Amino acid sequence: MGITIIITAYNYGHFLRGAINAAMSQDYPDVEIIVIDDGSTDDTPEIAAEFGGGIRYIRQRNKGLPETRNTGLREARTEWVIFMDADDRLSAEAVSLSVKFLQKSGVATNFVVFGEQIFSDDSYVPVPVDDGVLQCPLRIISLRDVVLRNRFGVCGLARRAAMLELGGFNRLAGGSDDRDMLIKLAQNGPIYFLDAPLRHYRVHSSSMCHNTLKQSTDTDWVLKNAREKFGSLLPASDWAMARAIYFYQVAYSYILSGNLKNATVACLRSIATTPWISSSDSSVLPFLARTRLLLRLAIKLSCFRKN
């Protein structure tokens, strides 16, 4: 069972070497590595050239992340692929454990999502993982899970043909193309969560998560598109809750960027959309999280006025 690791890269030459090394360090014997360079203007081509025939390097004119991932889907030579951003890493056991999971569980699926370890350059100590994770109960990720909140991403073992049949990654989804793909996969059949930190997600100053305006715009489009296509598959209350959680996340992002006014507006919009989210849904939004956020904002605004 061959596996292709697809590394998407755009002006991340200073991170790329680590990503390729992580892909090449897999303890699985049949791994193809493709680096898709989305028209980088830094030293990405030179870094990729250091690895010679150990990888396939494909350069295209700049098209954005969704189209870069689609190029990887078209170029892969195997049935199963794993997506990896150039600023991230993979556990050395990622491929072998996900393949064992498929074989041991016997599930029919198009996607096995990896758990993640979040790190920064100053705090990177990989969490060890072994076959013990295969003893955990099977966990299905439902359409409701990914509509309400995206906590997974598309780093996992994916069936290439299924993604292509669903139209690939949608360029209109921008930086939320992973959530759009998860929604399409989840409504098409069961997808599973391998609860082990196999993906190592780097947080840094140029991470897409710090671009509040773009991320909120892209997520808004994904949720509206999902409701238009799959609205009848979930109750109206779930779609409203998804909007409320979206506004909460926007509010939190604005707090991190120091924009307290926009954070307050977004938090109030969240409460107006769905005034009450019960403790039974604490997995997608901590109970009374919005109340605590408003109190935090009130304290910050009060201190700001005093100063």
Image: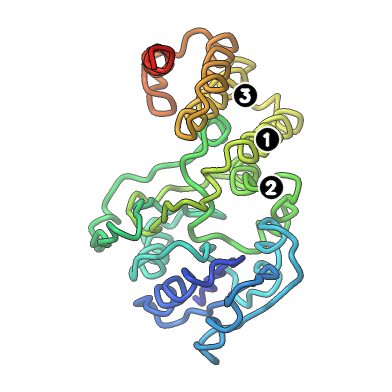
Name the residue located 55 percent from the left edge and 19 percent from the top edge: 261
Residue 216, quarter of picture: top right
Q: Position of residue 186 (x, y in %)?
A: 58, 42
Type of amino acid under label 2 = Gly
Mark 3 = which residue?
A: 234
- Binning the other alpha carbons within 10 Å of mark 3 as few (below 14), some (14 to 19) or many (20 upward) gives few
Type of amino acid under label 1 = Thr
Q: Are marks 1 and 2 in contact (CB under 8 Å)?
A: yes
- For marks 2 and 3 on the same chain, the one whose residue lies earlier in the sequence: 2
Find numbered disc 3 in the image and state the secondary structure of the residue it sits on: loop
Type of amino acid under label 3 = Leu
Q: Which of label 2 and label 3 is nearer to you? A: 2
Find numbered disc 2 in the image and state the secondary structure of the residue it sits on: helix
Name the residue located 33 percent from the left edge and 68 percent from the top edge: 93
User: Label 3, label 1: how many angstroms apart (C-alpha)?
Assistant: 23 Å
Q: How is the image coloured?
A: rainbow
- Binning the other alpha carbons within 10 Å of mark 2 as few (below 14), some (14 to 19) or many (20 upward) gives many
Name the residue located 40 percent from the left edge and 42 percent from the top edge: 139
Q: Position of residue 212 (x, y in %)?
A: 58, 37
Residue 191 shown left or right of residue 185 in the figure: left
Mark 2 = which residue?
A: 174
